[in-house]
């Protein structure tokens, strides 16, 4: 049970997800800092300045439209960065692969597969891969000794 849990945690997808969450939280903190430090005061100045900038009061109820507008702009900034930095490049990559412009991972050639099979058979027989002494660039195939 513990081994299965460890395998689950060390699987690539879980690690990638954990990194994404940490980076997302850090980016969210940067956007929040930008909104709190720059946008909210700017909206307060545009909205009339002073303590009630970006806010209006009706019957002793405070409506902080400036804070809402700052949060909305922060959301739009976050969504734009995610779209332009993550979504669009992945979409282009997928389109290139479907059109065949960018090849996926290269598959081994038949010769490479045969050499690998030969080496595995030799290792099972207790012999290492051998080379033909008459030609240094060739390899002896099984049955050619």
Image (cartoon, rainbow, N blue to C red):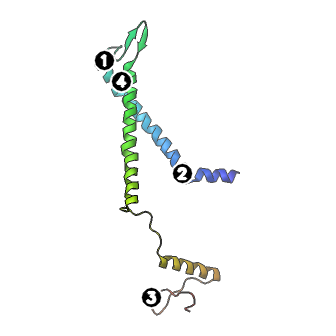
Closer to viewer: mark 4 or mark 2: 2
- Would residue 128 appear left or right of 112 to someone viewing this image? right
* Residue at image mark 3: 136
- Determine the CA span between mark 3 and mark 1: 82 Å
Secondary structure beneath disc 3?
loop
Residue position marked by numbered label 2 in the rendering: 13
Question: Whole-percent x and y of residue 32?
Answer: 41, 31
Q: In this picture, is 64 found above or below 136?
A: above
* Residue in front for this viewpoint, 10 or 64: 64
Q: Is residue 36 visible?
A: no
| Residue at the right extreme, as displayed | 1
Residue most extreme to the front: 99
Label number found at residue 47: 1
The reply to whether discs 4 and 3 touch (Cβ–Cβ < 8 Å) is no
SS at mark 2?
A: helix
Give the mark nearest the N terminus, 4 or 3.
4
First in sequence: mark 1 or mark 2? 2
Q: How far is disc 3 from disc 2 in space, using C-alphas?
A: 44 Å
Give the residue at mark 4. 40
Residue drawn at 37 percent across, 24 percent down: 69
Q: Say left or right for 102 vs 132.
A: left
In the visual, does 118 lie left or right of 79? right
Is the C-beta separation of discs 4 and 1 under 8 Å? Answer: no
Earlier in the chain: of badge 3 and badge 1, it is 1
Circles 4 and 2 in contact, beta carbons < 8 Å: no
């Amino acid at each position: 049970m513990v081994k299965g849990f460890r395998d689950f945690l060390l699987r690539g997808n879980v690690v990638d997800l954990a990194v994404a969450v940490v980076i997302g939280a850090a980016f969210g903190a940067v956007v929040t800092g930008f909104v709190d430090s720059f946008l909210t005061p700017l909206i307060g100045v545009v909205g009339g300045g002073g303590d009630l900038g970006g806010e209006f009061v009706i019957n002793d109820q405070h409506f902080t439209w400036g804070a809402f507008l700052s949060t909305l702009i922060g959301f739009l900034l976050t969504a734009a960065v995610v779209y332009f930095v993550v979504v669009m490049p992945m979409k282009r990559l997928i389109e290139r692969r479907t059109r065949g412009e960018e090849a996926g991972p290269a598959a081994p050639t038949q010769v490479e597969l045969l050499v690998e099979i030969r080496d595995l058979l030799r290792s099972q027989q207790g012999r290492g891969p051998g080379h033909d002494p008459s030609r240094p660039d060739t390899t002896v195939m099984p049955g050619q000794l």
